Amino acid sequence: MHTVKLIINATKATPTPPIGPALGSKGVKAIDFCKEFNAVTSPFMADVPIPVKIKIKDDRSYSFKFTTPHTGYLLMRAANIKKCTGVVGKEVSGQVSYKHVYEIAKIKKADECYKNVELEKICRNIAGVAKSMGIEIVR
């Protein structure tokens, strides 16, 4: 069994690199995966980067599981910024409210790794990521 990890934009999977070579080298038809992935991610906004883990069996059948977008991406969307500051701690690249942090925590709660974690702890984790990105949390 092989595992392939990729980050693919929702509803935008195409059998071009990096998807085509990653799956083709394992004997899986990339076009079939792309059609299935695009159908499953159709409820998401277009161009949202979705981390996906594809498990390929020896008989070339596959299954995939995707998680929520990375916390940094969600924070940057909430702060409405394209790029974070290069000098963390001295420059502020953007601001988010506690409500944004709470909403991001509710999104992240859907991930299997946060299944048994309290929402407050997820919020603290998100606050730490925001601080490391130079994003200020305001009331």
Image (tube, rainbow, N blue to C red):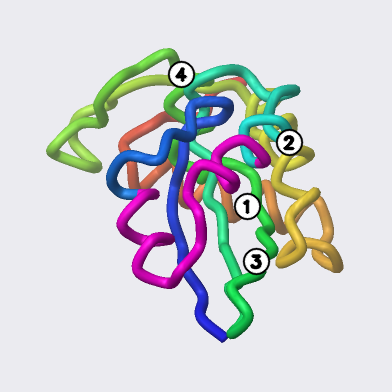
Q: How many labels were placed on the picture? A: 4
Residue 23 locus on image (x, y percent): 43, 61
Q: Which residue is mark 1?
A: 124
Residue 105 locus on image (x, y percent): 71, 42
**Marks 2 & 3, CB-CB < 8 Å contact:** no
3 vs 4, front mark: 3
* Residue 139 vs residue 5, the one in the foreground: 5
The secondary structure that dominates the magenta segment is: helix
Name the kind of residue labelled 3 in the image. Tyr
Q: Mark 1 or mark 4: which comes first in sequence?
A: 4
Quadrant in the picture for residue 16: top left
Where does the N terminus fall, quadrant-wise?
Answer: bottom right
Q: Which residue is mark 3?
A: 62
The magenta segment is 19-36
Q: Which residue is mark 4?
A: 79
Q: CA distance from mark 1 to mark 3?
A: 36 Å
Q: Mark 2 or mark 3: which comes first in sequence?
A: 2
Q: Mark 3 or mark 4: which comes first in sequence?
A: 3
Numbered label attached to residue 40: 2
Is residue 76 located in the magenta-colored stretch of the structure?
no
Task: Establish if 115 lies above or below 34.
Answer: below
For disc 4, the neighbor class at 10 Å (few under 14, some 14 to 19, many from 20) is some
Residue 52 locus on image (x, y percent): 56, 54
Q: CA distance from mark 2 to mark 4?
A: 28 Å
Mark 4: secondary structure: helix
Left or right position of 1 against 113: left
**Marks 1 & 3, CB-CB < 8 Å contact:** no
Mark 3: secondary structure: strand
Name the kind of residue labelled 1 in the image. Arg
Mark 2: secondary structure: helix
Is residue 21 located in the magenta-colored stretch of the structure?
yes
* Residue 43 vs residue 21, the one in the foreground: 21
